[in-house]
Image (spheres, rainbow, N blue to C red):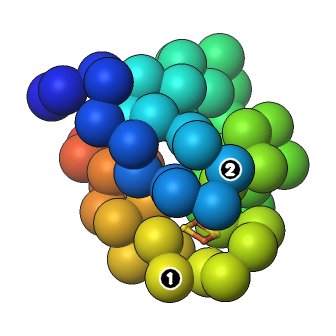
Amino acid sequence: MDRNKVVCRCFNVTAGAIEDAVKSGAKTFEAVQAKTSCSTGCGCCKPDVIELINQLTK
Ligand code: FES
């Protein structure tokens, strides 16, 4: 995984930031949203964020 890849452009949230959020206990899309603000803007990154969370939690 490229930790520097920006997943959410609206809030400049990287894959690494999402990984850290999941590792620190945010196991759902809503929890990751609350922790990183990702996907709280236009929402177009939602499928990518969910996909990433699924990968990280399986
Ligand atoms: S790109 Fe994530 S909310 Fe817009």
How far, Cα to Cα, is label 1 from label 2?
12 Å
Residue 19 appears in the picture as rendered = no
Q: Residue at x 79, y 37 (%)?
A: 35
Q: Secondary structure at mark 1?
A: loop
Q: Secondary structure at mark 2?
A: loop
Q: Residue 11 shows which numbered tag?
A: 2
Quadrant for the C terminus in the image: top left
Q: Residue at x 78, y 50 (%)?
A: 37
- Residue topped by disc 1: 44
Does the beta carbon at disc 1 come under 8 Å from ligand 1?
yes
Q: Earlier in the sequence, mark 1 or mark 2?
A: 2
Query: Which quarter of the rendered image does ligand 1 occupy?
Result: bottom right
Quarter where residue 27 is shown = top right
Q: Is 40 in front, or is 23?
A: 40
Judge whether 21 appears above or below 6 on screen: above
Q: Residue at x 47, y 71 (%)?
A: 45
Where's residue 46, x and y in %?
50, 74
Judge whether 38 appears above or below 26 on screen: below
Residue farthest along the right direction in this orientation? 34
Disc 1 marks a residue whose amino acid type is Cys
Specify whether 56 is left or right of 53: left
Quadrant for the N terminus in the image: top left
Q: Is 37 in front, or is 10?
A: 10
